[in-house]
Amino acid sequence: MTARPLRIGADGWVQGVTKIPSPNFDARPAGAAAELLVVHSISLPPGHFGGGCIQRLFCNDVDSQAHPFLERVAHLRVSAHFLIERGGAITQFVGCRERAWHAGTSAFEGRPGCNDFSVGVELEGSDFVAFEPAQYASLVRLTTALSAALPLRAVRGHSHIAPGRKTDPGPLFDWREFARLADLPADWLP
């Protein structure tokens, strides 16, 4: 059974996915539009999947006592527009018209501050575990919807826009397969 295409409403929220609004966002600068899709990976605690820790991080509700690593991140005020879990479920935290706080210190084609002009998608994963086919399928559906609604012109990993500081989505993310499945133009990719 083929999944229904995703559609982004005029408000920047995707119809048909789970919505958990994050407080960690603000307005894009005047005239800024989402031209860049940034692919990340995350697991909390590192190497652990499921359990809702990522969702709680993006909503400033981390239980810092649940695991020693969580004490190190509980104070962070971060978000992404989307999370794609291991089974392919998509959750949206910030509307695509708004600026999520996902890229940190970053630059693309010499332009700093990628949060201003990007959409951030977190894949539940790590540098050491292959991503699931369901995650690629959901990322393709989401990328198709985003490129239909926004002026996207490139896709990069967090490691490409913050080299030396970030490694995600990591060496196991299959850029070639993602590009093939999403039918992306060659000049959109790293």
Image (cartoon, rainbow, N blue to C red):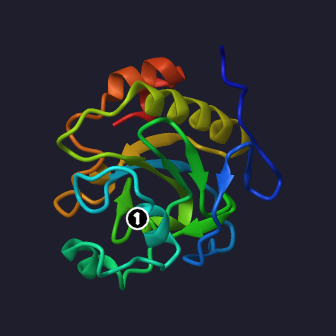
Q: Position of residue 85 (x, y in %)?
A: 46, 44
Front residue of this view, candidates 132 and 37: 132
Q: Is residue 88 above or below residue 71?
A: above
Which residue corresponds to mark 1? Answer: 53
Q: Is residue 28 visible?
A: yes
Q: Is residue 101 above or below residue 121?
A: below
Residue 74 in percent (x, y) is at 35, 81
Q: Is 162 in front, or is 89?
A: 89
Q: Residue sitting at 48 percent across and 41 percent down? A: 154
Task: Give me the residue at 41% from left, 57% from top.
Answer: 51
Quadrant of the frame with the C terminus? top left
Left-right relation of 6 to 37: right
Determine which quarter of the picture holds residue 6.
top right
Q: Is residue 34 left or right of residue 15?
A: left
Identify the residue at the far right of this view: 10
Q: Is residue 103 left or right of residue 67?
A: right
Q: Residues within 10 Å of mark 1 (few under 14, many from 20)?
A: some
Residue 132 lies, in percent from the top left, at: 37, 30
Q: Secondary structure at mark 1?
A: helix
- The spot of residue 120 in percent (x, y) is 49, 55
Query: Looking at this view, is 56 or 131 the one in front?
Result: 56
Q: Residue furthest top?
A: 1
Type of amino acid under label 1 = Cys
Q: Residue at x 67, y 23 (%)?
A: 3
Give the quadrant of the N terminus: top right
